[in-house]
Structure formats: C-alpha cells, structure tokens
Image (tube, grey):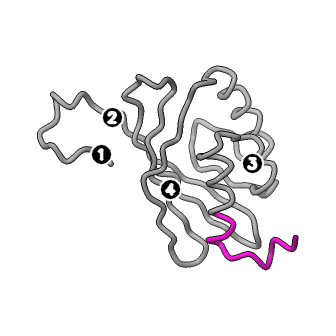
Amino acid sequence: MDRSQLSAREVADRFIEVFYNRNRLVDAFREWVHPDYVQHDPNSKTGRDGTIEALGAHMERNPRMTHDVKRVIYGDDGMVAVHYHFRREPDDRGLAVVDLFRIENGYLVEHWDVMQPVPDPASCKNSNGMF
C-alpha cells in the first residue's frame, strides 16, 4: 500500500477504526503514526515510540476502557478532530475528549487534545449534555 496516495480522511478513518473502535491503541500507533510524531499534551512524551510505551501501560491499567466516538470533523490541510466519550470502566462518567490530529503523507504527524470530566447531571445548569 502506498500510504502517500491516501487522503487525510482515509488515513483518519483507518486510524479511528483501530484506535477508538477496536480499542487497539498500540496497533493503531504502530501502523498510522509517524516515528517523528509531535505531541502537544504536556503529560506525554513526543515521538511515536514514547507514546506507544505510555499507551501500552495505559491499556494494562485500564483493560475495560472505551472510546465512544460521537463525531469526527475533517478540516483543511490534513486536520481531523475526534470528539469522544472516554471511560476507564463501563460505569464511569468519564471524560469528554477532543483529539486533534494533523495528517501528512499518510501518517498522523501531530496531536493536541482537550479533556473535560463529565459531571453529574444533577449539577448541570442545562440539560444539553456534553455529547
């Protein structure tokens, strides 16, 4: 497969299927993330290999975690946003997360994220929900 012939959307869709839907985080990174991956999350190492190491440990600590993708936004210049509900355990309220990726030449090459705890609905000032 000549990955450089894939559109950013095709790369994103393939990564999303493996990472979020199949919950095979390390496999998704090995296949679709460039070795020189730039990480903007200050709590994570930059580079694909450092992230793979952290994801492996994360999967061991949270074997029942889920990533329920709510929407994907495909932007210009290879930018993709994935909005999802992350839970470590099925009964957790979890986090509302947006991962923002830049895709270039068939690889995810850069990442930013924003996370917000899902509150108790009784404490919310509206009934719109986070998703």
Marks 1 and 3, the one that precedes in the sequence: 3
Q: In this view, does 21 lie to the left or right of 73?
A: right
Q: What element carries label 2?
A: loop
Magenta residue span: 1-12
Magenta-drawn stretch contains 10: yes
The residues tagged by marks 1 and 3 sit, at their Cα atoms, a distance apart of 27 Å
* Looking at the image, residue 17 lies above or below residue 1: above
The residue identified by callout 2 is 118
Give the tally of numbered discs. 4
The secondary structure that dominates the magenta segment is helix
Q: How far apart are labels 4 and 2 at the CA level?
A: 17 Å
Identity, as a three-letter code, of the amino acid under mark 1: Met
Callouts 3 and 4 close, C-beta under 8 Å: no
Is residue 92 one of those drawn in magenta?
no
Separation of residues labelled 4 and 1 (CA atoms): 14 Å
For marks 2 and 1 on the same chain, the one whose residue lies earlier in the sequence: 2
SS for callout 1 = loop
- Mark on residue 82? 4
Q: Name the residue under label 3.
A: 29
Identify the residue at image location x=51%, y=49%.
113
Kindly identify the amino acid type of the residue bearing the numbered disc 3. Answer: Phe
Mark sitting earlier along the chain (2/3): 3
- Work out how far the residue at label 2 is from the one at label 1, CA to CA, in angstroms: 7 Å
